Amino acid sequence: MGRTKRVVVGMSGGVDSAVAAYLLREQGYEVVGVFMRNWEETDETGTCTADEDFDFVRRVCGQLDIPYYTVNFVRQYWDRVFAYFLEEYRRGRTPNPDVMCNKEIKFAAFLDFALTLDADYLATGHYARILREGGKCLLAKGADPGKDQSYFLHVLGQRELSRTLFPVGEMKKAEVRRIAAELGLANAQRKDSTGICFIGERDFRAFLSQFLPAQPGEILDLDSGRTVGRHEGLMYYTLGQRKGLGIGGVGSAEPWFVVKKELESNRLWVVQGKDHPMLYSKACTVGAFHSVTGEMPRAPYACRAKFRYRQADQDVTVYPQGEGCRIVFAAPQRAVTPGQFAVLYQGEVCLGGGAIDAVEGNTNVSGENVL
């Protein structure tokens, strides 16, 4: 008989990774829990969320009778994820740190650490599935459509997927909660984490201002060219944003929306009305596309895409261009944003994706592309 296969589980303190560890133990694996410490500063209330998370990991691992470790990736997180996060904001883009965290920390630095523990597999509490077909590992959507996290995992490739297990990927969230409650796990009723990956919920403007100086400027109406307000710094706004603009008593009663950030002049451009044509675009460009299987089609192909998490899949045609692609939308898309990720699907299978570099929008009367 061969030795029992060892699985290192990334334990976050949440219910999903806790149940993942339990399921693997029940399947006969040797399970080791590991807590990643990636951010050590306290929040605005003076709380270090990492300490609270680790306390839940310690308690759950004790209940499951599995060993646990802590590994410190603070430096790697700063260098590989947070530096990217800040640079994207400096460039006027809207980053998605969760995607980069998966790429650089959870399935890179952490996977390397797991292998030093002689692990056969790494496991997490992500809601996604791995299919094996024709000698390749395919990334598929989780069985719970409301919790599917394949969007955030599209950066994974064959090395990562061949060494990864997603134990709750075939389950609905309610079932995961039920199992945790039946086991009496310490975190059975703990709410799901939100906010920036590993940093948590913050007063975003106050947090970002600690690292990037804000430069207030004018807010202008794109249709009339007149000044309608003042912004607090372009980094605080994203395309399609409605809330927090502070524009009142100007124009009609319809709400205002951001359509353009002009870094050179430090101007924020807005339009009025949720269906304004300038909020929509017809195509976008991805400069560097990551393929899950490593295969890059050279001919145009039809598939579906998401341009933000929780968006319904949209019909598109993809035109490969060098290392990237141009994605043409079957129907105009609202608030497609540079810095966010375009992720492609064929049915339930995630093909891969990449950061949106440019958006092709409607044009103003002069013919200039304003998006």
Image (cartoon, grey):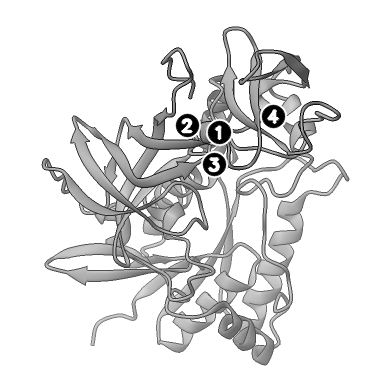
**Res 294 visible:** no
- Amino acid at the residue labelled 4: Tyr
Q: Quadrant of residue 230?
A: top right
Measure the alpha-carbon separation of dots 3 and 1: 10 Å
Q: Secondary structure under badge 1?
A: loop
Instruction: Determine which residue is flagged by label 4.
Output: 236
Measure the alpha-carbon separation of dots 4 and 3: 15 Å
Query: Local crowd at mark 3 within 10 Å, few (<14), some, or many (≥20)?
Result: some
**N-terminal of the two: label 4 or label 3?**
3
Camera-side mark, 4 or 3:
4
Residue 367 screen position, x and y as percent = 41, 16
**N-terminal of the two: label 1 or label 2?**
1
**N-terminal of the two: label 4 or label 2?**
4
Name the residue rendered at 71%, 87% in the picture.
Answer: 184
Measure the alpha-carbon separation of dots 1 and 4: 9 Å
Choose between 311 and 140: the one closer to the eye. 311
Marks 1/2 in contact by CB < 8 Å: the verdict is: yes
Residue 243 screen position, x and y as percent = 74, 39
Q: Secondary structure under badge 4?
A: helix
**N-terminal of the two: label 1 or label 4?**
1
**Res 344 visible:** yes
Measure the alpha-carbon separation of dots 1 and 2: 6 Å
Instruction: Describe residue 199's horizontal placement relative to residue 89 as left or right.
Output: right
Instruction: Determine which residue is flagged by label 1.
Output: 94
Residue 97: mark:
3
Instruction: Determine which residue is flagged by label 2.
Output: 338
